Amino acid sequence: MADPRVRTAPGVPGALAGRRVLEVGDEKGMYAGKLLADLGADVIRVERPGGDAARGLPPLLRGAPAPGASVPFFYLNAGKRGVTLDLEHPRARELFLRLAGGADVVIESLPAGGLDALGLGFGALRATRPELVLVSLSGFGRSGPRRGFATSDLVAAALGGLLQVTGEAEDPPVMLAGMQACAAGSLVAAAGALVALLHARRSGRGQHVDVSLQESAAALGHICGAPKWLDDGIVPRRAGSGLFASVPSGAYACRDGLAYLMVNRPAHWTALARWVAGATGVQEILDPMFEGPSSARLPYRELVDLWVAELAARFDVAGFCREGQERHLAVTPLQGAAAVARDPQLAARGFFVDVAQPGGGSLRLAGAPYRLSATPWRVQRPAPAPGEHNAELLGGELGLGADELGALARAEVV
Amino acid sequence: MPGGALAGLRVLELTAAMAGPWIGRFLAWCGAEVIRIESREHPDVVRQYVPPRAPERGVQPELSPWFAEWNAGKRFVALDLRRPEAVALALRLASISDVVIENFSAGAVERLGLGYEDLRRARPDLVFLSTSGLGDTGPCRSHVTWGPNVEALSGLAALSGFPGRPGAFTQYAHPDGIGALHGLVAVLAALDHRARTGKGQAIDLSQYEATAATLGVELLELAVGGEEPPRPGNRSRAAAPQGVYRCAGEDRWCAVTVADDEAWRALCGVIGRTEWEADPCLATREGRLAHADALDAGIEAWTAARPAEEAMARLQAAGVAAGVVQTAADLARDPQLAARGFYEEVEHLRAGCAVVTGVPLGLTGTPGQSGRAGGRVGEDNEYVLVGLLGLGRDELRRLEALGAVQPPDPR
């Protein structure tokens, strides 16, 4: 059952073993299917013949000219199977509906209303199987005055309120790496699918799950959102590394790099104040006026920052983090990708997994975001080549003969 | 089915701050009964709230808007878990629960006798989620972290931001939310597994790993190329031009993504740059990427002359992805969010009513609902201990006298 192209512990079925998911659309929803696939679901990505445009998303894997050489495509689709169908063609739509009839969930991120226009909307899908769950991931949801707006990860992060509070005060608002608005929307889509599946298991009825990237982003950033503003009238803005409500917090310069320190609890402040006083001789920091929750220190942010900076400058990053953690203070290094790739904590937990790449060799992929004790997280296979599973799914399962499949392929229906 | 998609499910929380409670918040919205154990000795950091508009009132444990955000719709029981009688009550609560979520400091629930091995004896098919900064195993498992620490640790900050500028941090503790959403997915998948097999399990969630998983493309780029991926600022290698452009007014901006050649021609039309549209050097994404600085300057010359809302409306009308960089105040009056009823008004036990951020699950067949906010520590002792566990009132008074159960402060 284990794919020899993936070097992970084989064997135990995942939590979602037996669940089948069809996925169609652009890169915005790919992480949703990946989450479900790595939990054991059989996720089938439906692409247009020859493969979706997302297979060309830069950067490309070196020395691998084949379609599927895109780094984003490879990571976000590892674990899935792939079929190709030209949904503009009636025969392909019929095959899609037959595949949907054997699935538990369809996840789509086509342009708003795209599935309906193809005659593959929720009504048509539900007719194939009453328990079916359809998840539509779109920029703004399927209702409301802006349902037809065009979107992107950046635009969703902007309208969801994330950009305004990310980056330096003197710079323009800036996005996060990793298409984080799409990641949030995909996580919400996966969760919505699973809630609907649990409900369908009891009720026998599926439903349409209508996920908005803007709402997913606004929910993720709610600490800086509308309800807080309604409460206190403060509009949060970009402020560099320090969190506006926590004093001290921020990235401080050690001798060889930056470390992040944050104090939230009164006991943590006491430990930090003693450390600063002991190491730097600054006794004023022990004044009781600074004690208590962060709010007590909000008026003294600049002064406290100076003292912490003086402390941090005496250490290298590793020493500052070690001594801080020994005092139960939240002090961590600022790491780039290379430092993450060799982080001993991740190594001890076996975070990275090796997956074969097209054209030979293997690639190290970021691994499990969670550990399930009875049903281990697992990458089931490398990302599929275009139409890699046409024969086993359209032929083997739906019963198309080799001749018919060949004819459909020549007509570019599959 | 009345009461939401997860009606009948019971969840017990040993949680504080956001990362744990926000998971239960989603489940409560879906109709699950969510019970949080708290104590006076270890108050949730978010209950240490001093209202910025009235600091003279001091700490107001029920009034934090964040406390409402993370706990609307839950029940609150107050137990002093240093007492064996209280631990026994917690075990009885676990025995009638389907899910337990904990995010106490490393090793704390085990020391209390409320770790997974203890709880599964009380409830063999329990789904148990432990969420922490760095996970329950490994040399750094006991490290203390908050959400922003994980932005630093995971590469998120260093990989984000403008070239030559500091790595970008958020003001909203991004990994707290990302970790919680991953935790939610894991719990739901484990419930589906339990429904099929009858078996529960323990889930170990590391915010660090969950955040790193969302950076899988950047981490793979490093593995392939051997070099640190460049900081992108607001640019994309897949779409050009893309940026955040200054608009009229103080700190007003509009984000724009030109996704393809069709959107490029539309952009040129809207901003009156017919010479760009005619320029073959700019007809392809690669060509536009090579001239990104000049294009950004030209687009900003147009946006800077008008309000962000106008820039967005005119670009969207032509099919170009564009969006105002919204503030908290903008979100409160966003017509799209309002039309979809995203923000919810709920009953607040202290303040009368409160607005909370919606839960974006989009369940059109079984729409969820946010419940009441502003519960005190121990608000629902009677409901939980008498109503659910069947304790007699005399027994409750005895446990209160012992200090195992802590009655709520009078209103």
Image: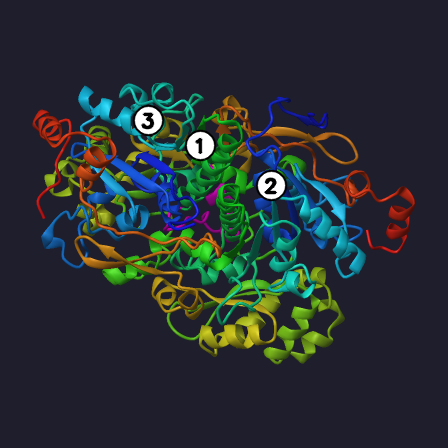
> Is the Cβ of the residue at disc 3 closer than 8 Å to that at disc 1?
no
Please give left or right for residue B87 compared with residue A15 in the image. Answer: left
| Chain that bears disc 3 | B
Identify the image quadrant of the N terminus of chain A: top right
Residue A269 visible in the shown view:
no
Q: What is the number of the mark on residue B384? A: none
Which one is in front, B332 or B77?
Answer: B77
Seen at 31% across and 35% down, the residue is B13
Q: Amino acid at mark 3?
A: Ser
Residue corresponding to mark 1: B205
Residue corresponding to mark 3: B95
| Residue A162, position as x, y percentages in the image | 43, 56
| Chain that bears disc 1 | B
User: Would you say residue B169 sits in the magenta stretch?
Assistant: yes
Which one is in front, A378 or B246?
Answer: A378
Instruction: Determine the secondary structure under disc 2.
Output: helix
Please give left or right for residue A253 compared with residue A147 in the image. Answer: left
Q: CA distance from mark 2 to mark 3?
A: 33 Å
| Chain that bears disc 2 | A
Q: Amino acid at mark 1?
A: Leu
The secondary structure that dominates the magenta segment is loop
Seen at 38% across and 40% down, the residue is B8
Q: Check disc 1: other Cα within 10 Å, few if <14, some if 14-19, many if 20+.
A: many
User: Would you say residue B373 sits in the magenta stretch?
Assistant: no
Q: What is the number of the mark on residue A34? A: 2
Q: Quadrant of residue A231?
A: bottom left
Seen at 65% across and 36% down, the residue is A79
Q: Quadrant of residue B89?
A: top left
Q: Marks 3 and 1: which is nearer the front?
A: 3
Question: Where are the magenta residues, as a range?
Answer: B154-173
